[in-house]
Amino acid sequence: MAFYFKSWLFVIVYAVLCLFLTKKDLLSFILSFVMFPILPLIYGLSKKNWKPKYKETPDFELPSAGVKVSYDKLDVVPIDLIMKYGSIEQKKKAIETVYKMVEELRLEADRAAAILYTFLMNETSQDIVLYCTEYLEQIESFLISQIGRYSKLVHTKDGLFNFALYSYQYSKTPFLIDEQKIEILRFVREKLEQSPNEFFDKNLADLYLRILVDLGEKEVFEQKFKSFENLYTNAEKAVLLSYARKIFAWGEKDGKTTRDNET
């Protein structure tokens, strides 16, 4: 008899507690018996002010102003994540940040265009699509203005390098069709080959060699690489040769090129 009394007392106390927790909501009160006897525990955990154990960071941690960051040193993962999972306002902020980094020479324009273009292809919000498209157009305008600016200064070493750099970046963007890209690269190659040899330091030589690779000029690349080889460290030579191997038919097997095998 005492056992039954205690059991009923427990049920009554549980019912009163659930009625209090559910604030007299009949449906929630009924569901509380379905979740018997863990509703108080669930309610208590939901009200607890949990604090993350990780260290919180600002939305964006950008490189310091005035520093040009190379492809392999820039971490844009936080921006990528915001573009995928952020709110509309966060996505807009991320798009603006990518463009701002281009303007401040902290991110290569072709990489920025690739980031925004990939984001654009996977975005469903028309508001964000239009916003992203506007900034893609601004990146293209930035590249065109830089090319136009430095095309008048190709008689100087710095002017030639910047003209070649922005032209090469433009050829890597999704704004152009293949024929246009090849036309740009051929024009830049012509300008480089008409320039004094003393203009060719490591940076300009690297651009020139990469242009030869993208044009598929294997024999010319091999000749020029030998003449510029003393400008590079072994690690830098390895990076350039690795880039060339992705395009040239090095390591042919059974009469098929590497590119043929990949396709």
Image (tube, rainbow, N blue to C red):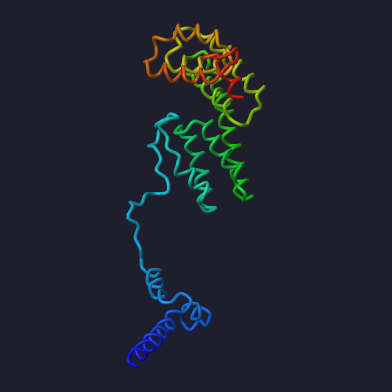
Q: Which residue is drawn at 53% across and 19% down?
A: 164
Q: Which of 132 and 7 is in front in this view?
A: 7
- Outermost residue, bottom direction? 1
Quarter of the figure that contains the C terminus:
top right
Looking at the picture, how far across and down is residue 52, in whole percent?
35, 57
Q: Residue at x 45, y 39 (%)?
A: 76
Quarter of the figure that contains the N terminus:
bottom left
- Outermost residue, front direction? 1
Is residue 249 positioned above or below 263 on the image? above
Q: How many labels does the image show?
A: 0
Looking at the picture, how far across and down is residue 218, in whole percent?
55, 11
Looking at the picture, how far across and down is residue 243, in whole percent?
49, 20
- Residue 134 sits in which quadrant? top right
Is residue 101 positioned above or below 201 on the image? below
Q: Which of 146 and 133 is in front in this view?
A: 133
Q: In this view, does 17 lie to the left or right of 136?
A: left
Q: Residue at x 42, y 34 (%)?
A: 74
Is residue 56 positioned above or below 209 on the image? below
Looking at the picture, how far across and down is residue 203, in whole percent?
44, 18
Is residue 16 positioned above or below 176 on the image? below
Q: Is residue 210 left or right of residue 178?
A: left
Q: Which of 221 and 24 is in front in this view?
A: 24
Q: Is residue 194 left or right of residue 230?
A: right
